[in-house]
Image (tube, rainbow, N blue to C red):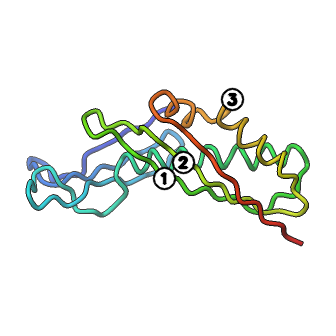
Amino acid sequence: MECTVSWTGAAGTRSGMGFVAETGSGHVLAMDGAIDAARPEHGGQNLAPRPMEALLAGTGGCSAYDVVLILRRGRHDVRGCSVHLSAERADTDPKVFTRLHMAFTVSGHRLPREAVERAIALSHEKYCSASIMLGKTAEISTSLELIEME
């Protein structure tokens, strides 16, 4: 797996904190910093997610992918899966994630709660590389809302 991250600041200047990541699979992800009026040289233009937000989003995507795949492999009628992530970071550098809560909403027809809970657990214990790595610094918790669909 490869990725190239490039600063998008104007050549020869030190303005802006925008970056573009080009992934090995040929996709592009923009990242930017917040506007910092007190220290403009440190701030961005708020045009894209922060790098840590991208990390959080990637973790949610990784885990939701696992949950859907595990349920499908079990021949369950899963029809929707979303996860809301909320994180806390350390106050001092490095400002790692210290707490992470993942609130899953999974919908389907006659989905056994136990199967969905098992899929979430398997993701966090075995398959989701991102959440397993973040678990080295953060206390991770999960919750589940299960929605029955006809």
Q: Which quarter of the figure has residue 147?
A: bottom right
Q: Which amino acid does label 1 sit on?
A: Ser
Q: In this view, does 43 lie to the left or right of 114?
A: left
Q: Is residue 24 left or right of residue 124?
A: left
Q: Which quarter of the figure has residue 66?
A: top right
Q: Is the residue under label 2 in contact with that under label 1 (CB below 8 Å)?
A: yes
Residue at x-position 83% and y-position 51%: 113
- Compared with residue 131, is residue 81 higher up or lower down, i.e. above or below? below
Residue at x-position 66% and y-position 49%: 64
* Residue in front for this viewpoint, 58 or 109: 109
Rendered location of residue 15, percent (x, y): 12, 53
- Compared with residue 20, is residue 107 higher up or lower down, i.e. above or below? below
Q: Earlier in the sequence, mark 2 or mark 3?
A: 2
Q: What residue type is labelled 2?
A: His
Residue highlighted by disc 1: 86
* Residue in front for this viewpoint, 116 or 21: 116
